[in-house]
């Protein structure tokens, strides 16, 4: 028997009893809808939580601090960085070299920047999610003497020729216009200048090129706020000079043992494992948002389990509905099944047809249930955003300003329909086996 | 075509043993139209059902079209039936939701035949039984005689080697019965198919080439043996059972 013919007969049988089919499918609809809506709320809450934690700092980033640089400790050198980079779940890693304050400045004519300066692997900045307000990240050729200021750091440039009123502030004037900073790093010439202990410039300046301006973002590590970044290659040279100048008080890069490094993992779920692996490499002082996130996530999982469980109960009821419908239909069709057997229909095809019928009911209910869930989800989000701190808004407390409570990701949408079909088919197994066992002879002898 | 050897069928109902068939042996030739005649409860249907594989014999052996089908699994039987056996029921047994054409095409659906081909074959068959104008009708829209003609078309549509019919005229008046019998016998002759027909009506039995009379689970009369040897009053099996 051909699959198409079996499907055709199943559909025909379902259409023959439209009311019963739709009522049974309605049961599945409610069950699927309940599960999807419940899970979507759980997912929405989790996403909201991640989002609000993400505002405090990137949740996939691990910071490594190398406070204790005694000789018996592992060194946070290029070799250690490379072994971290080789971990599967690690997307990017960069050491962070804090250029000691006062050891050098960036000058553009008479204007001077003496704020924070970090040496990082500039090729990794994009992976770490640093955004550009304008310009671009430096390419391989430019990287050696590129500099990227955060947009607010540009207001740190001050006029060295004046003793007071020597800065512009990023506050709007009477007309509401925010004044431009003194320096435009994309156009103006920039020079890195070493400083001696008295605060005087010393040595020959290094030419720098500003390829872009970073969007101010406190959540990054190192923070893209009141900071300038140069590439690690330049930072290494700086470190050497600072050491020979002796102006840094010994806080230079002693044989490339970095103070700090940051690691970006592929996803939130990798953070814990990678953090552990870093500990194992001999760097116990790490910090990630995981310490905040993990306990909340655990609570969320519990909430999700409870919500999903509530939905699952209604799907179990729906499964019983399918079971009942199929058994009823077998009683009615006993004679028909007997005749089909006598005419040479194979038992496995009879079973397949019954399973298909049950599966189609599941599919129907699943698709409709998903549709209803989308509607319900939109409605919940509408009330959550308009009602502000309603009952659901209350649960969300820690998620702060996030207004979408119910989120249906694609996997949930697809998964729920597949699940509904499975529920249908599984509920059909028992009735189908019953149909198969019907003796052809007793079936055709039965009076109609 | 059909070879039955020493078939016994014993039913156990509430510890009581009911002997439906006491030991039947017979042979039906290819293309033969064989009528099994007997009073009610004599075991005609039981014999037919066993030959068609709807029931298992308590003892004995059956060969159909040269194959020993006695120990066939349910699946083998289904596949064997698809190719070799047609069945006509007393109460028609058409599927109520299908049209006449779809009912006739059903055995071809089970054989996995393409839709175009099976519709063509079914239509041809319906024309042959004189229902060319009723193809789209549901069983409920047809008379008993018409329904039985659909049933006959369905039994013959896959050109099986053997067609079994259990009282095909049992629910029909004598005029319609004659019509139905003529069609069925006509089709069997045209396609040179073996037809085994059960009835308790002597007039119907007269349509066949050969007559078998069954009484209390034994073959009491066989027209082929009778013409060959003019047998005595009792057949050997009967004599054995009587003692
Ligand atoms: N499933 C069964 N269980 C018990 N006894 C049965 C069963 N089927 C048939 N019998 C018995 O077997 C005997 C033969 O039955 P069968 O149906 O073959 O008779 P029949 O010749 O076809 O009669 P009819 O002309 O009324 O159809 C009867 O005595 C009947 O009671
Ligand atoms: Mg009978």
Image (cartoon, coloured by chain):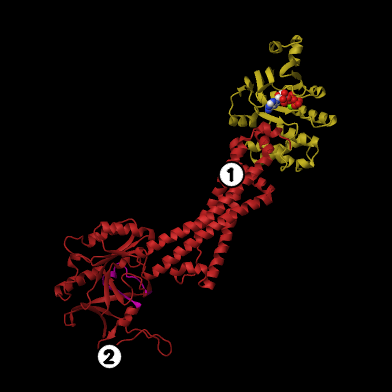
* Chain with yellow colouring: B
Q: Colour of chain A?
A: red
The magenta segment: A133-151
The residue furthest right is B175
- Give B56 or B28, whichever is nearer the viewer: B56
Q: Do residues under tags 2 and 1 come within 8 Å of each other at their CB atoms?
A: no
- Give A21 or B86, whichever is nearer the viewer: A21
- Give B146 or A34, whichever is nearer the viewer: A34
Whether residue B189 is visible: no
| Residue at the spot of label 1 | A428
Query: Quick one: label 2, few (<14), some, or many (20+) residues within 10 Å?
Result: few
Q: Which mark is residue A164?
A: 2
Q: Position of residue A421 (x, y in %)?
A: 56, 49
The residue at label 1 has a CB less than 8 Å from ligand 1: no
The residue furthest front is B14
Q: What whole-number distance in Å separates the C-alpha atoms at marks 2 and 1?
A: 85 Å
Asked if the magenta segment contains residue B132, the reply would be no
**SS at mark 1?**
helix
Q: Position of residue B171 (x, y in %)?
A: 80, 32
Above or below for B218 versus A342? above
Instruction: Give ligand 1's quarter of the image.
Output: top right
The answer to whether A297 appears left or right of A41 in the picture is left
């Amino acid at each position: 028997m051909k699959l198409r013919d079996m499907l055709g007969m199943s559909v025909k049988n379902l259409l023959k009893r439209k009311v019963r089919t739709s009522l049974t499918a309605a049961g599945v609809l409610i069950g699927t809808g309940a599960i999807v809506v419940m899970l979507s709320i759980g997912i929405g809450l989790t996403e909201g939580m991640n989002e609000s934690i993400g505002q405090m700092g990137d949740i996939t980033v691990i910071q490594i601090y190398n406070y204790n640089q005694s000789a018996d400790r592992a060194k946070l050198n290029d070799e250690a960085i490379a072994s971290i980079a080789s971990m599967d779940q690690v997307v990017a890693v960069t050491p962070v070299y804090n250029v000691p304050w006062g050891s050098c400045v960036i000058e553009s004519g008479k204007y001077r920047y003496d704020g924070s300066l970090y040496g990082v692997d500039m090729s990794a900045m994009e992976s770490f999610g640093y955004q550009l307000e304008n310009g671009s990240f430096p390419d391989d050729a430019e990287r050696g003497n590129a500099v990227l200021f955060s947009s607010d750091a540009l207001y740190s440039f001050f006029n060295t020729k004046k003793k007071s009123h020597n800065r512009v502030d990023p506050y709007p004037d009477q007309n509401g216009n925010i004044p431009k900073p003194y320096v435009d790093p994309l156009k103006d010439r920039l020079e890195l200048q070493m400083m001696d202990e008295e605060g005087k410039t010393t040595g020959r300046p290094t030419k720098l090129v500003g390829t872009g301006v970073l969007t101010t973002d406190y959540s990054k590590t190192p923070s893209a706020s009141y900071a300038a970044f140069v590439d690690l290659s330049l930072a290494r040279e700086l470190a050497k000079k600072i050491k020979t100048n002796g102006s840094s008080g010994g806080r230079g890069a002693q044989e490339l043992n970095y103070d700090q490094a940051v690691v970006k993992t592929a996803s939130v779920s990798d953070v814990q494992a990678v953090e552990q692996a870093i500990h194992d490499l001999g760097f116990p002082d790490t910090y990630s948002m995981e310490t905040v996130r993990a306990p909340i996530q655990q609570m969320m999982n519990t909430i999700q389990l409870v919500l999903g469980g509530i939905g699952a109960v209604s799907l179990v009821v729906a499964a019983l509905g399918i079971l009942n419908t199929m058994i009823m239909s077998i009683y009615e069709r006993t004679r028909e099944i007997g005749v089909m057997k006598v005419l040479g229909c194979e038992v496995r095809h009879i079973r397949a047809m019954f399973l298909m019928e049950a599966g189609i009911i599941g599919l129907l209910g699943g698709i409709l249930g998903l549709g209803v869930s989308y509607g319900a989800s939109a409605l919940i989000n509408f009330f959550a955003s308009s009602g502000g701190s309603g009952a659901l808004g209350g649960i969300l407390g820690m998620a702060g300003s996030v207004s979408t409570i119910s989120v249906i990701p694609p996997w949930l949408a697809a998964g729920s329909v597949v699940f509904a079909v499975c529920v249908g088919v599984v509920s059909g197994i028992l009735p189908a086996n019953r149909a198969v066992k019907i003796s052809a002879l007793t079936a055709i002898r039965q009076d109609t | 075509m059909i070879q039955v050897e020493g078939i016994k069928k014993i039913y156990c109902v509430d510890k009581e043993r009911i002997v439906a068939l006491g030991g039947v042996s017979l042979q039906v030739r290819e293309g033969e139209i064989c009528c099994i005649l007997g009073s009610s409860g004599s075991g005609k249907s039981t014999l037919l059902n066993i030959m068609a594989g709807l029931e298992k014999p308590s003892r004995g052996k059956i060969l159909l079209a040269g194959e020993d089908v006695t120990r066939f699994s349910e699946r083998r039987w289904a596949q064997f039936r698809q190719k070799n056996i047609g069945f006509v029921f007393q109460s028609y047994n058409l599927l109520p939701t299908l049209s006449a054409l779809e009912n006739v095409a059903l055995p071809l659906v089970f054989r996995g035949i393409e839709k175009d081909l099976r519709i063509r074959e079914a239509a041809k068959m319906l024309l042959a039984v004189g229902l060319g104008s009723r193809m789209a009708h549901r069983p409920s829209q047809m008379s008993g005689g018409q329904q039985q003609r659909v049933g006959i078309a369905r039994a013959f549509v896959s050109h099986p080697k053997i067609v079994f019919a259990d009282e095909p005229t049992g629910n029909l008046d004598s005029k319609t019965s004659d019509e139905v019998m003529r069609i069925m016998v006509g089709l069997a002759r045209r396609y040179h198919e073996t037809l085994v027909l059960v009835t308790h009506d002597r007039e119907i039995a007269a349509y066949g080439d050969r007559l078998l009379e069954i009484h209390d689970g034994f073959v009491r009369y066989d027209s082929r043996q009778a013409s060959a040897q003019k047998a005595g009053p009792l057949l050997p099996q009967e004599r054995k059972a009587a003692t």
